[in-house]
Structures are given as C-alpha cells and as structure tokens.
Image (cartoon, rainbow, N blue to C red):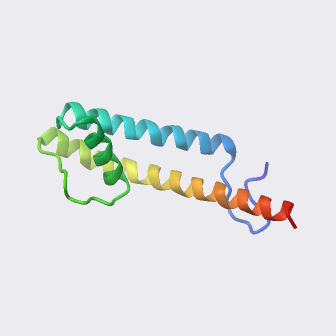
Amino acid sequence: MSKFNNKKEFIFPRSQFLVITIVSVVLLIVGTVFYHFIEELKWLDALYFSVITLTTVGYGDFSPQTDIGKLFTIFYIIGGIGIIFGFMNAFYEKRIEKMNQFRKKNK
C-alpha cells in the first residue's frame, strides 16, 4: 500500500496506525496509574486527568499536588501531546480514507 494517495497526502499504513494507537493507550495507562498512586486520585479521576492533560483541555478542576506529580506532569505533557495529536491525526486520516473508498465504491 502506498503512503501517498493521488492528492499526495500522507496516509498512515495499518502497522503505523496500530503502533501509534498502542503507544497512545499505554501513555494514558501510565498517566492513570501514576496519578492514582502518587496523587491519590480515584481511577476514573486519574484517567480523566490524563486525558484532559494530553488533549490540552485542562479544565483546572484537578492539578498535581506533589512535587513529583508536578515534575511528572511537565514531562508527560511535553512527551504526550505529540503522541496523542499524532493518534488523532492518524484516526481522522483513516476515517477520511474509508469514506473516500466508500464513495468510490458507490458511484
């Protein structure tokens, strides 16, 4: 499968999409476990905080209270934002690719 379609846009091959999906899920799990044990957040609150942090929503209802939590969050944001945005980009490219294939098939 070519990495480029006829519009010369990058399309993630299935293996790259799978890798970035797994990395994104692992990143969310790591953040959730860290915030649960270090910041003593409930599991759902820890997952929620991980998601809103990496998607840059940041409602402000949670924030790290420990020094280690603050340091972790700094590196979590720096490393994680690119990965999560890469996943979101790959996800939407796959959706667009499937919609285009569906349209071609039904012409």
Q: Is residue 101 above or below residue 70?
A: below
Say whether residue 50 is left or right of residue 97: left
Please report the residue visible at 67 percent of the width from the left and 61 percent of the height from the top: 96
Q: State the image coordinates of residue 50 (x, y, percent, origin top left).
A: 32, 46
Q: Is residue 36 above or below residue 20?
A: above
Question: Observer-nearest residue: 44 or 29?
Answer: 44
Question: Observer-nearest residue: 96 or 74?
Answer: 96
The quadrant of the image that shows the C terminus is: bottom right
Splitting the image into 4 quarters, where does residue 99 fall? Answer: bottom right
Count of picture labels: 0
Say whether residue 66 is left or right of residue 81: left
Please report the residue visible at 84 percent of the width from the left and 64 percent of the height from the top: 104
Splitting the image into 4 quarters, where does residue 106 fall? Answer: bottom right
Please report the residue visible at 54 percent of the width from the left and 43 percent of the height from the top: 20
Say whether residue 56 is left or right of residue 1: left
Please report the residue visible at 28 percent of the width from the left and 35 percent of the height from the top: 43
Say whether residue 21 is left or right of residue 34: right
